[in-house]
Image (tube, grey):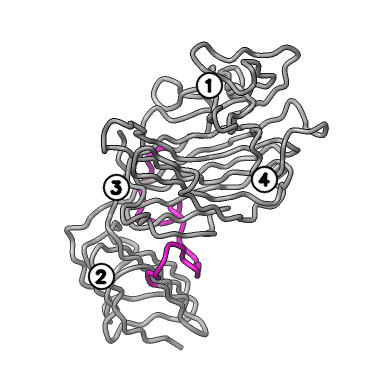
Amino acid sequence: MKKILILIVLKGLLVVSVSAQEKGIGTPPGLEVQQLLPVEHPSVDKNWAVVFKDDFNTLDTINRWNKAHNAIHGDYTKETEEPQVYHRNDAYVKNGKIELRTQKLNNYYPCPKGNACQYEGKHYYTSGQISSQKRYKYGYYEICAKLPGSDGYWPAFWLWNSTPSTETTNCWYNEIDIFEAAGCNTDVVTSNFHWGFQCPTDVYSKSKGVSNTANNFDNIYHWYGVEWNSNKITWYIDRKVVRQVANNMEGIGIQNGMYIIINVALHPIVNWWDCQISSNTIFPNFMYVEQADAYSLICDSGVDVDEIPDFANFNYGVKKSIKLGNSTPISPRDRISLRATDYIELKPGFEAPIGAELYLDVHPCSVTEVQ
């Protein structure tokens, strides 16, 4: 038995799972996409190419990563300064993974020279952070990690960059939190994004977070990822979509290259998640990162495709347009992912058997730019 499909995808995402019914999604009004459909992950989607796959047998501090040292996050004037100081000795490779260690000190660590600290210049905790040496614009980014539990912990994997000048109109703040987690609730992580396009940038009033399930994240390794392009931002946990938003904040969106950051923080005085350091907090504690990957779409957007007679030898990539008809065979077990910038047309005569899955996406092709 076969399903006969006749449609044209002009914009947005369509997933056809050929069984009892078809499923589809376009670009809805508003910021959040309410319906989530299965999406092929870049590791198995042939429209993506690997930018890097880092298994952390070593930590490349020459070409890829920086270790934060004598660094403090937050704004002491708003009591959002974090109580830890990032120290290079708390980010290291061990047993084929990165360990980001958080420690409580017997004596205080002085606030680095040149900084004004909420904690009277005395910090009793150190922790680890690594960040990319280069900025990346658009693509898919993920890590496989196990996170620290117990009160006070605030691990994160995020993309960030800003130009906070108050003297020019070239002022913006971009941030995508692929995940943030509160160590006192080890079944939930939060996806978030912040933006600001005017000086001064008040990023705390321009953000939107959503809670997602990541069961036992302190005992189980999970994959955390995000796909970011000029039209939308899509979050993944364990390589399945959990959230999607239109990338069009204030008609602009998050469009600037950003640094990749992996860190373990402790909650500041202002405690958004009611998870401050307590007598139950475990020290030392660790975030373990087994792998970090980056992918870029393959852009072949000058090509119009009329029929695909052989998917095994098809040159995948984001095309200008794709037309599929009765000369395009689909088998019952096929999982096919096709992307185009203009449109995808399923013509009269196109047939797909029960059991096949077709993922179609129409959007601009955004190659990962390294800056």
Mark nearest the camera among 1 and 4 is: 4
Looking at the image, residue 260 sits to the left or right of residue 367; the answer is right
Residue 364 placement: quadrant: bottom left
Q: Which residue is mark 4?
A: 273
Residue 51 colored in magenta in the image: yes
Choose the circle earlier in sequence order: 1 or 4: 1
User: Compared with residue 71, is residue 113 higher up or lower down, i.e. above or below?
Assistant: above
Image disc number at residue 343? 2
The part of the chain drawn in magenta is 26-52
Mark nearest the camera among 2 and 1 is: 1
Image disc number at residue 367? 3
**Residue type at tag 4:** Trp
Q: Residues within 10 Å of mark 3 (few under 14, many from 20)?
A: some
Looking at the image, residue 168 sits to the left or right of residue 159; the answer is left
What residue is rendered at 58% in x and 19% in y? 87
Mark nearest the camera among 3 and 1 is: 1
Q: Residues within 10 Å of mark 2 (few under 14, many from 20)?
A: many
